Image (cartoon, rainbow, N blue to C red):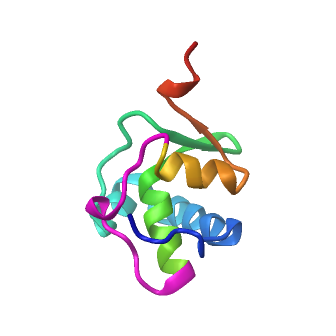
């Protein structure tokens, strides 16, 4: 898995703004991601494809976006990183 420690909350916020500007379908298509299957980033009144958001946030942090194959989107991947940055991510690990 690539080093995601350089991604900041501001980088994620920039990716969220781009997602909002382009719309979900265009954002996912542009960066080669599919819709989230299990983990969804919740921000404001909206939900976002968590893995795609983190992959694009990496572009804001480093200049290079990550592809879907570069890292995992699950509990120990994108969801963990996004939660550590203070974002709410819903997923199957929340179900008792």
In the rendered image, which quarter contains the N terminus? bottom left
Vertical side of 28 occupied by 89: above or below: above
- Image quadrant holding the C terminus, namely top right
Query: Residue 38 in the image: x percent, y percent?
Result: 41, 33
Residue at 51 percent across and 31 percent down: it is 91
Point 73% across, 51% down: residue? 86
Residue at image coords 62%, 72%: 11
Examine the image and state in which quarter residue 7 appears.
bottom right
Give percent across and percent down for residue 83: 65, 48
Residue at 30% over, 59% down: 68
Quarter holding residue 5 = bottom right
Pinpoint residue 9: horizontal percent, then vertical percent. Answer: 69, 65
Q: Is residue 81 above or below residue 4?
A: above
From this viewpoint, which residue is outermost toward the top?
96
Bounds of the magenta segment: 61-75
Main SS class of the magenta portion in the image? loop
- Residue 95 % position (x, y): 55, 17
Q: Nearer the viewer, residue 5 or 8?
A: 5
Q: Is residue 85 magenta?
A: no
33 left or right of 81 in image: left
């Amino acid at each position: 898995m690539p080093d995601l420690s350089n991604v900041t909350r501001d980088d994620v916020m920039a990716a969220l703004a781009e997602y909002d500007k382009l719309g979900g379908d265009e954002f996912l298509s542009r960066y080669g991601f599919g819709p989230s299957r299990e983990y969804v980033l919740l921000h404001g009144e909206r939900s976002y494809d968590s893995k795609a958001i983190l992959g694009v946030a990496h572009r804001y942090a480093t200049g290079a976006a990550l592809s879907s194959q570069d890292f995992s989107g699950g509990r120990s991947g994108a969801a963990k990183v996004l939660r550590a940055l203070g974002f709410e991510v819903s997923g199957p690990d929340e179900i008792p």
